[in-house]
Amino acid sequence: MISIVTPAFNERSNLPMLYERLTAVLRQVDWEWIIVDDHSHDDTFAVIERLVALDSRIRGIRLARNSGSHLAITCGLQHSSGDAAALVVSDLQDPPELLVQMLERWRTGVQVVWAVRREQPGEKQHTWFASIYYWIMRRLVGMTDMPATGADFFLIDRVVIDAFLAAADRHVSVFALLMWLGFRREFIEYDKQPRTRGHSGWTLTKKLKLVVDSIVGFSDFPIWWFTYGGAAAIGVALLPAAAALVGYSGFGAALLLVMSLVIGLFGLQLIALGVLGHYVWRGLDEARKRPLYSIEAVVKADGVRVAVAGDRRQ
């Protein structure tokens, strides 16, 4: 069975349309649909209730407060019972018809199928903010496998779902955590569609929070920048000190020495912040209890592969 997970915020007009397209695409598949209402301000949950009354394969969950799409996705995955789960957003920008191709890849043994937005000449496929975010994730955080154009439409195996939920991050970036977990994955390209109804709830504040969660949750590079910056400042501080000792005297030499002292102390402060940051980072790493490793498959001593939940190749 396939679990479809859909976070929804003020999407009353789009959910019935999405239901029609899902039923058309998944006619020959055993599936369930989990819709998580992220405390919408309109009657989104009333629409969900009508859909549940219409189709027993649908389950609706309403969060007690607006928690953001990533926590809504996590909630949906926690309540999923399928052998695999797919994220399908309610704004219809990610075509549900792509699920057919994603399911085919999953049945061949791929555990994570990412749908990557295709760059189209003459069209602005993603905003400057998204471009900066994915550049940071690839170049600074170190997730070099993350597509430069972004990937926020995926299908994951039950093994991956269990590994994701075992992390239990409170400030989670779903896509970054799935990239970090690894597993056998493939990428397929698609054209992201324009939103036809409603308005996006993805505000600038939520975008900035995602950037912070992604950087703090998966990399310590800002701490290293403090350390390197401090070492560089101390190196720069030696230049005016050397000039004062070699070619200047009197007031000029004193001024250069004071400048050297100020820059040197600034460098020492940065290094001290870097050292303190490393201790805090290690404490954070221990406190969040993220798994040290995730098992993809197991093989017995006789060479027989042990069945793993959700493995399609048995």
Image (cartoon, helix red, strand yellow):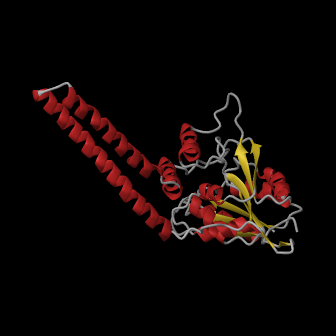
At x 61% / y 65%, what residue is drawn?
74
Residue 166 figure quarter: bottom right
139 over 75 or under it: above or below: above
> Of 215 and 86, which appears nearest the observer?
215
Side (left or right) of 255 relative to 16: left
In this rendering, does residue 37 appear at all?
A: no
Where residue 311 sits in the image (x, y, percent)?
81, 67
Quadrant position of the N terminus in the picture: bottom right
Q: How many marks?
A: 0
Residue 313 figure quarter: bottom right
At x 34% / y 54%, what residue is drawn?
273
In this rendering, does residue 159 appear at all?
A: yes
Side (left or right) of 126 relative to 86: left
> Of 64 and 241, which appears nearest the observer?
241
Give the farthest residue toward the top.
247
Side (left or right) of 183 relative to 65: right
At x 28% / y 36%, what residue is drawn?
238
Where residue 306 sits in the image (x, y, percent)?
82, 73
Quadrant position of the C terminus in the picture: bottom right
> Of 252 and 314, which appears nearest the observer?
252
Where residue 279 sits in the image (x, y, percent)?
40, 62
190 over 61 or under it: above or below: above
Where residue 141 sits in the image (x, y, percent)?
54, 49
Give the farthest residue toward the front.
246
